[in-house]
Image (cartoon, helix red, strand yellow):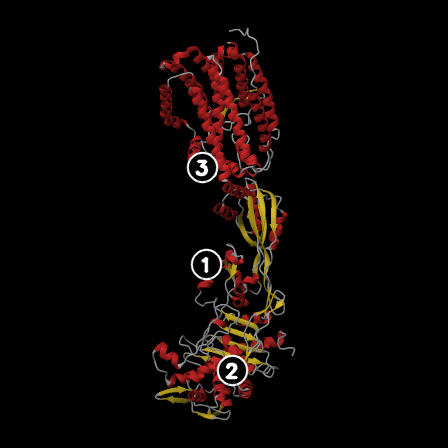
């Protein structure tokens, strides 16, 4: 499928605007989160990542998603190889092997695996089309999911490992797989949980237990979640003001520039800030679903749903986690959490979404 | 269709998040607000100093002094071994002791631990000088209540200890808090509300590891009000010293207005031990001691007055006109009531005695006869009149009332009739009659002032405002009768046959009376009371020595030494 087409579809300005607004908000909160200590140029670095992300998004916007889909398997296999490489030569930080280093540049292949997985699965689903209703066509997607999950789980990175499950389920669901089959898969997954627990590190088990009762270990594993709830709760309606959150500024809130950045928003901007952010995210996801739904090409449609799901899971699980609704599994908040690999992945996803919207009319 | 379902699922998830956040930030805000405040705001109490207690001449009796404690901040220690061996050497304890304290009391890296209390000033200065080399070691100063005269005024002044639950409930409205020290006895207790300082505090903002970020506010603590007592510190400490190895009590009072000049009780205790946490064992031992050092015998010791009571009986005889000063009784050394023989203390007897002689020689037979004439109820009436059997209402807690027996009392309480033999005993101050040394000081003051009954008190000033002593009440008794007895009291000391000769003091005319209080536990208690100068009384004194022997000898000796000290070393006798 050659791009003998003309680029004159629609461009979704709302979608990209929401992304820009949230990213800029993110820079402000990163500034606040790092205001009192350590790396003072945290927001600058994030800004650099964001600019790089926009460049990537533009590249992926230009490429044409069909060509990406064509190479979907290759890219996915390449990513799997990188994940293997991480386990062999990866850089250990915070007790986990997640990073690959090239000179001064380091990145996490596991972050990119989210999108390459969606790409490969979209190709598969587009190729088998209606046959997906047959159970045997579910075997390959299962393997496609299991391989990156196993590798990432080994790093270990529990949060990222679990992300693959909802992406798989949603993409199967949307592509017309039998509900019965999906439920079977879900049931099988649940049965696996006890076995999974055997492989969990102690700190991960502690986190799960603490989710059930944070006061179990208020100074240890429960500390973060208790402090996070205090931060959000004490923000009240209008918050304590930017740079004035006592929980964040006085260091009571750990990991506040990464997974717990939402707590800083909650403390300093209060309910108004949180509600605004929720509304922006919600609008963003709705836009993504609209794009997916308006795409008749199964490849594009599956890919768009995959991308929307990646974002939806991150947003819902992260916010649910900092509010104490879900266990602390270490999942970043798109466009807000500090970190290059995920930010760039997010921008690439946005680029691909815009791409799908732009080109779909041609077919 | 499936797209709709998916979209709806996402929306439901967002609605759940929205309401969770609403719940946390709006509904539960008050809780989380408080929690966040607690997280980062620490209240550091600043203790309001307790008021100073002065003696009548402005000498401090009780003050506050700076004490220095050595504390450790575990997280600041760099080289544990080096630091501790250095500190151990300076404060003179072993390194192992320090480590043990640390292990025992460790709570958190930022929580300070006290490793030595109340080190001396020089040591504190040395530690301050080397503090650069020993990070994590701090010298903290705080105010400690300081009883300057140690044992010497402890029964008047009392002591402090931590407030208990019941008191806290009662006193919370007056600004008392959980860690307050409150007066447990003496003046510290009675005037606690004035002496107590008003605590202040600092609001500090701290970060997650407890480091100070800034001070949010300060309330300056206020010192409690100083009080001035009527006591003369020098006399007090001398009296207390004389009493050091004895069980007994001394009261020295101004008979004209009830000012207590000195009041001591032996054995005594050092109130400082109740403040010093290192001395808690000594404190417990004091509270449990069988010698009862915590009891103020001057107001709580209850003894038979013995022959001291004779002055009241004599006056009662004159007042009721049962006798005149010339009425005589013949003393043959014994006195029969029915078949029972009552003896005079002098074998063979005093012969014919008039009132004055009876008093000078403290002749029992004379007073047996007089007592029989008066009867028990008149004796009781005069005992009450002179303030026995009821508290003097001195400003000290838990004063004893003593006891005045009556015929009616014996009938109702014991169900027995009053026997004549008991009247005989009553008239020489033995038997059921019990008095406190302070009550006797009040009795002798009535004679010294010829009829005025002063209210004993310790307080002179609160802050700068003087407390005016209540005006002495006047008894309706004949001054002439009182003077008859006063003359006898002078003769007791001055005459060659007087019982109180041993108390003679060069250059000071004294009126006095000896007494012996029988007690079943052993040697009788020795009493001596009087006033001086006899012509213009400035002091009234009472000395009681438990098991001090017959005839009040030891008490008289003690009185002599006290009077000499007053003559030589105080201003009390000087001036008009």
* Subunit under mark 1: B
Query: Quick check: B95 above or below B56?
Result: above
Read off the residue under disc 3: A214
Read off the residue under disc 2: B513
Of marks 3 and 2, the one in the foreground = 3
State left or right for residue B134 relative to residue B352. right
Q: Residues within 10 Å of mark 2 (few under 14, many from 20)?
A: many
Mark 2 in CB contact with mark 1 (< 8 angstroms)? no
Q: Residues within 10 Å of mark 3 (few under 14, many from 20)?
A: many
Mark 1 element type:
helix
In whole angstroms, how far apart are the C-alphas of marks 3 and 2? Answer: 81 Å
State left or right for residue A212 relative to residue B475. left
Along the line of sight, the residue nearer the viewer: B298 or B499: B298
Percent coordinates x, y for residue B454 in the rendering: 55, 77
Percent coordinates x, y for residue B429 in the rendering: 44, 81
Read off the residue under disc 1: B166
- Let me know if marks 2 and 1 both belong to one chain: yes
Q: Residues within 10 Å of mark 1 (few under 14, many from 20)?
A: few
Along the line of sight, the residue nearer the viewer: A242 or A39: A242
Of marks 2 and 1, the one in the foreground = 1
Percent coordinates x, y for residue A121 in the rendering: 45, 15
- Let me know if marks 3 and 1 both belong to one chain: no
In whole angstroms, how far apart are the C-alphas of marks 2 and 1? Answer: 46 Å
Mark 2 element type:
strand
Residue A80 in sight here:
no
């Amino acid at each position: 499928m050659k791009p003998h087409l003309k680029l004159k579809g629609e461009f979704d300005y709302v979608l990209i605007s929401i992304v820009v607004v949230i990213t800029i908000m993110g820079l402000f909160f990163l500034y606040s989160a790092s205001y009192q200590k350590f790396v003072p140029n945290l927001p600058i670095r994030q800004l650099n990542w964001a600019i790089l992300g926009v460049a990537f998004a533009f590249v992926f916007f230009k490429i044409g998603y069909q060509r990406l889909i064509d190479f979907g398997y290759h890219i996915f296999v390449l990513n799997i190889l990188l994940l293997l490489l991480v386990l062999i030569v990866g850089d250990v930080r915070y007790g986990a092997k997640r990073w690959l280093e090239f000179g001064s540049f380091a990145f996490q292949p596991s972050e990119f695996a989210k999108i390459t997985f969606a790409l490969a699965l979209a190709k598969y689903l587009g190729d088998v089309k209606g046959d997906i209703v047959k159970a045997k066509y579910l075997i390959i997607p299962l393997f496609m999911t299991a391989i990156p999950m196993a590798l990432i789980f080994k790093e270990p990175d529990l949060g990222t490992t679990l992300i693959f499950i909802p992406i798989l389920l949603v993409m199967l669901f949307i592509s017309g797989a039998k509900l019965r089959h999906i439920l079977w898969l879900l049931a099988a997954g649940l049965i696996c949980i006890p076995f999974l627990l055997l492989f969990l590190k102690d700190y991960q088990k502690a986190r799960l237990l603490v989710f059930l009762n944070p006061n179990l270990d208020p100074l240890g594993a429960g500390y973060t979640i208790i402090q996070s709830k205090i931060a959000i709760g004490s923000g009240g309606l209008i918050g304590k003001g930017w740079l004035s959150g006592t929980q964040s500024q006085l260091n009571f809130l750990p990991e506040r520039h990464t997974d717990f950045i939402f707590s800083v928003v909650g403390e300093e901007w209060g309910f108004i800030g949180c509600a605004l952010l929720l509304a922006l995210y919600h609008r963003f996801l709705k836009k993504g679903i609209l794009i997916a739904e308006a795409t008749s090409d199964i490849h594009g449609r599956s890919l768009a749903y995959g991308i929307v799901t990646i974002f939806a899971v991150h947003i819902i699980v992260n916010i649910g986690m900092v509010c104490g609704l879900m266990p602390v599994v270490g999942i970043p908040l798109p466009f807000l959490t500090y970190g290059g690999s995920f930010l760039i992945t997010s921008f690439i996803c946005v680029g691909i979404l815009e791409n799908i919207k732009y080109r779909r009319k041609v077919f | 269709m499936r797209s709709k379902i998916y979209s709806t699922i996402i929306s439901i998830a967002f609605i759940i998040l929205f309401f969770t956040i609403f719940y946390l930030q709006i509904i539960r805000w008050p809780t989380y607000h408080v929690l966040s405040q607690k997280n980062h705001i620490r209240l550091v109490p600043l203790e309001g100093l307790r008021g100073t207690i002065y003696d009548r001449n402005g000498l401090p009796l009780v003050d506050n002094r700076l004490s220095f404690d050595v504390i450790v901040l575990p997280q600041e220690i760099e080289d544990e071994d080096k630091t501790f061996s250095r500190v151990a050497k300076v404060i003179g304890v072993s390194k192992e002791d320090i480590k043990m304290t640390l292990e025992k009391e460790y709570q958190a890296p930022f929580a300070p631990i006290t490793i030595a209390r109340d080190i001396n000033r020089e040591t504190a200065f040395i530690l301050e000088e080397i503090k650069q080399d020993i990070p994590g070691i701090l010298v903290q100063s705080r105010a400690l209540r300081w009883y300057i005269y140690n044992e010497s005024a402890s029964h008047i002044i009392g002591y402090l200890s931590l407030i208990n639950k019941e008191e806290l409930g009662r006193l919370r409205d007056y600004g008392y808090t959980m860690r307050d020290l409150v007066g447990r006895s003496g003046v510290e207790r009675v005037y606690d509300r004035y002496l107590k300082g008003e605590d202040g505090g600092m609001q500090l903002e701290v970060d997650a590891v407890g480091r100070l970020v800034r001070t949010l506010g300060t309330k300056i603590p206020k010192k409690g009000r100083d009080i001035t007592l009527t006591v003369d510190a020098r006399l007090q400490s001398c009296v207390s010293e004389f009493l050091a190895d004895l069980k007994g009590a001394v009261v020295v009072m101004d008979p004209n207005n009830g000012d207590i000049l000195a009041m001591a009780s032996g054995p005594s205790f050092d109130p400082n031990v109740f403040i010093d946490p290192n001395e808690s064992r000594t404190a417990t031992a004091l509270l449990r001691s069988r010698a009862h050092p915590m009891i103020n015998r001057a107001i709580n010791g209850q003894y038979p007055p013995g022959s001291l009571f004779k002055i009241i009986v004599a006056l009662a005889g004159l007042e009721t006109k049962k006798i005149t000063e010339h009425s005589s009784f013949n003393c043959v050394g014994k006195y029969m009531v029915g078949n029972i023989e009552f003896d005079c203390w002098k074998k063979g007897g005093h012969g014919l005695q008039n009132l004055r002689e009876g008093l000078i020689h403290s002749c029992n037979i004379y007073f047996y006869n007089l007592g029989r004439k008066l009867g028990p109820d008149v004796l009781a009436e005069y005992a009450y009149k002179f303030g026995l059997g009821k508290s003097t209402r001195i400003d000290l807690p838990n004063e004893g009332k003593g006891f005045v027996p009556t015929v009616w009392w014996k009938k109702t309480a014991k169900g027995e009739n009053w026997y004549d033999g008991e009247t005989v005993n009553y008239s020489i101050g033995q038997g059921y009659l019990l008095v406190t040394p302070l009550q006797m000081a009040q009795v002798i003051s009535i004679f010294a002032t010829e009829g005025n009954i002063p209210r004993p008190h310790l307080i002179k000033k609160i802050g700068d405002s003087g407390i005016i002593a209540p005006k002495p009440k006047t008894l309706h008794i004949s001054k002439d009768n009182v003077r008859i007895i006063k003359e006898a009291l002078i003769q007791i000391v001055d005459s060659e046959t007087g019982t109180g000769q041993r108390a003679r003091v060069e250059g000071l005319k004294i009126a006095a009376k000896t007494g012996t209080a029988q007690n079943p536990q052993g040697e009788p208690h020795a009493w001596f009371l009087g006033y001086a100068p006899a012509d213009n009384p400035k002091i009234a004194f009472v000395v009681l020595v438990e098991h001090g022997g017959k005839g009040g000898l030891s008490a008289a000796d003690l009185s002599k030494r006290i009077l000499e000290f007053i003559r030589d070393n105080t201003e009390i006798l000087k001036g008009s």
